[in-house]
Amino acid sequence: MAEEEDKELERIRMKKLREMLRRRFSGGSEKQISFPDRPVNLSDTTFKEFIQKYPLVVIDCWAPWCGPCRILSPIIDEIARDYVGKIAFGKLNVDENPKVAMEYGIMSIPTLLIFKNGRLVDQIVGAMPRRMLEPRITRHL
């Protein structure tokens, strides 16, 4: 019985160590990733680098005149603070950055683009309360 418990403890210890190393290091390199604690303003020129830098990225595509975008913005800010170190958030003003908006076929705003390891894995269109939005984002962790 004690031997089984020792094996289980060692398995848990190794799993935890792998998780810690995965969070700390990017792609096996020795470089530590520093996650932003709030959404980063992006442009057509900084977009690609940002989505490739972090394992999980959420991009809020918005415009200043958009009422639903203004409603969603503080929700995104809260989620960004709560998931710092796990999810990187960016904001892309589609009026000022039409190249990315066209590339991803953004026809309505707000639109959230979710990237995992640099690849688009989900797209969420429209504003919604945090209790509905958060699970749609965190299922990609």
Image (spheres, rainbow, N blue to C red):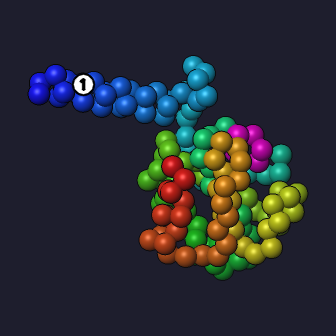
- Of 48 and 135, nearer the camera is 135
Q: Residue furthest bottom?
A: 67
Q: Is residue 103 left or right of residue 134?
A: right
Residue 87 x, y percent position in the rendering: 54, 48
Residue found at x 37% / y 31%: 15
Of residues 58 and 115, the one drawn nearer to the viewer in this rendering: 115
Q: For the view shown, which residue lies furthest in the left direction?
A: 1
Locate residue 82, reporting x and y percent: 44, 53
Q: Main secondary structure of the magenta part?
A: helix
Q: Nearer the viewer, residue 120 or 48?
A: 120
Please report the residue visible at 55 percent of the width from the left and 40 percent of the height from the top. Answer: 35
Q: Residue at x 83, y 46 (%)?
A: 45
Local secondary structure at mark 1 = helix
Q: Which residue is mark 1?
A: 7
- Provide the residue span drawn in magenta: 47-52
Relative to 103, say whether 10 is above or below. Answer: above
Can residue 60 be seen by looking at this rendering? no
Q: Answer with left or right where residue 54 lies relative to residue 83.
A: right
Q: Looking at numbered disc 1 in the image, what kind of residue is underneath it? A: Lys
Residue 60: name its quadrant. Answer: bottom right
